[in-house]
Amino acid sequence: MTARQPARLLGKAAGRVATMGPGFGFLTVFMLVPLALVLSYTVFRRGRFGGVLYEPTGENFTRLADPLYLDVVIGSVKLAAITTLLALLLGYPTAYLIAKLPARWKVIALVAVVLPFWTNFLIRTYAWIVLLNSEGPVNSGLKALGLGPVELLYTDGAIVAGLLYAYLPLMILPLYSAVEKLDPELREASANLGARPARTFWSVTLPLSLPGVLTGCVFVFVPSLGNFVIPELLGGGRRIMVGNLIRDQFLKARDWPFGSVLALAVIAVLVLLLFAQAWAARRAGRGA
Amino acid sequence: MRRHGWLRLPFWLTYLFLYAPIVVLVVMSFNRNKSPYTWGGFSLDWYGRLAENDSIRTGLVNTLIVALGSTVLSTVLGTLLAVGLARHTRSRLLDALSTLPAILPDLVIAIGLLVFYSAIKLTLGLHSVLIAHTVFGMAFVTAVVRARLGGMDTSLEEASRDLGAAPLTTFVKITLPTLAPGIVAGALLAFTLSLDEFVIAFFTAAPSEPTLPIVIYSMVRFGVTPEINALATLLLAVSFTVVIVAQRLTRLTEALR
């Protein structure tokens, strides 16, 4: 037995390298190194045709406070927050009802939520150009009711509709799995103790599903911030969001260091929200 | 269900919201009228036009090359990674690292690779998009295969080992066949993801070799044409089929939590 020990250890190490080595090697070269490069570029001066000059500077960070850019950030956070809130308002009841469906219907309802998400994102955005156009179906409906035509396309509302359409499934999935895991006995106990349904929802169901709520919020809010296609196609370029600003720094203005700072800001928001989610998950785990 | 009567409104609203735009697109693709907004009778004209459009055809060929290549690469790397994560480590850090490409905003991955390719002076082309798509395709394959591994009975593997089979033999004869449905489902997902991916391709493709989504982007920017509706309908049909097949092969909705 003891003679075979080193051989087994060696075998274990070999198994580890053979299975995980190629994948993590690939991710290191094509994800971690690129991310590290972007991070490092935040402290250097911009090169004339993209790239950087290796002269350290703090300028890129102070530019973030420039009112011009601050407005963009505040405006994007506002639109992303509205989108997230709407996704939650639509998504929570939907996820809740899906979790209550009989098993067969549950799968169908879930697949129906996921399906649009796996289709071409440009096509989904394009659908809203068709829908919201001044001659489109929504406006013909409004006209028939004597309410229109109203300018719907190229507004903040159109951007929110597009973002909501793009990311709503990402809100519903984590909410569903959070609600489904809830022990129905907890709700029954609450009801038996005389709590009204609303009270039970606010003090039992919602706190316990909070980790799912936060996961959903991360999945909607962060990509909404970083989206540049929807503001361009549905907002008509009138509203610039953080995503547009980042794209422009890399593909138009050729200011990679400032673009890197903006990307870092988006990553920071992501990390912060993920920590909040982990905290909520720990709390909910303790309570249950 | 009856107890939650008022919850039905947002429930049905969600599905209406998700499917109404798709239905409008599909219906309008069969519209004879040139204006995509008013109905002028049934016609397949726009599908015919589509077949004659050279930039769409080139884009489609480029996209298929990228999607097939990155799917093969993602599937091999992702399957191995899933087995490694499930059998050879308990590290939560490595676990998180494997899902990171799926969580990071696409724009961040895109600029990272743009910066990286420029730093190593790699000429952009289909190969640079292929690599980029493998970064996130792999994460999805890993997740789906891991879900399958989670429900797998390990006694067969143990029996194979106890009977003296080499680790590689056990892997090829026992582990892989059991995982096959998960691997195929993961591959299908990586394929559709690559087929439809725009942001990362936009940053990592050469202007002379655009993928189909890049071609669609420039078409959409010029305005609404029924040709795009026809193309949209075909792409929707492909994605829907692939996802439903993947769902049948494995409990996809479980894996993507």
Image (cartoon, rainbow, N blue to C red):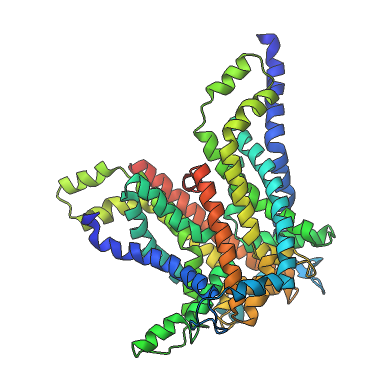
The residue drawn where x is 64% and y is 51% is B137
Query: A278 and A141: which one is in front?
Result: A141
Q: Is residue B64 depicted above or below A4 in this figure?
A: below
Q: Is residue A206 left or right of residue A15?
A: left
Where residue B196 appears, x then y in whole percent? 62, 61
Query: How many marks are shown on the rendered structure?
Result: 0
Q: Is residue A112 depicted above or below B156 in this figure?
A: below
Which quadrant would residue B14 be assigned to in this image?
bottom left
Query: B229 and A5: which one is in front?
Result: B229
Residue A32 visible in the displayed image: no
Where residue A69 appears, x then y in whole percent? 60, 77
Query: A256 and B59: which one is in front?
Result: B59
Q: Is residue A214 depicted above or below A225 in this figure?
A: above
Query: A137 and A245: which one is in front?
Result: A137
Q: Quadrant of the C terminus of chain A?
A: top left
Where residue A51 appears, x then y in whole percent? 79, 67
Q: Is residue A286 left or right of residue B23?
A: left
Q: Quadrant of the N terminus of chain A?
A: top right
Residue A111 visible in the displayed image: yes
Where residue B81 appears, x then y in whole percent? 64, 39
The residue drawn where x is 54% and y is 47% is B246
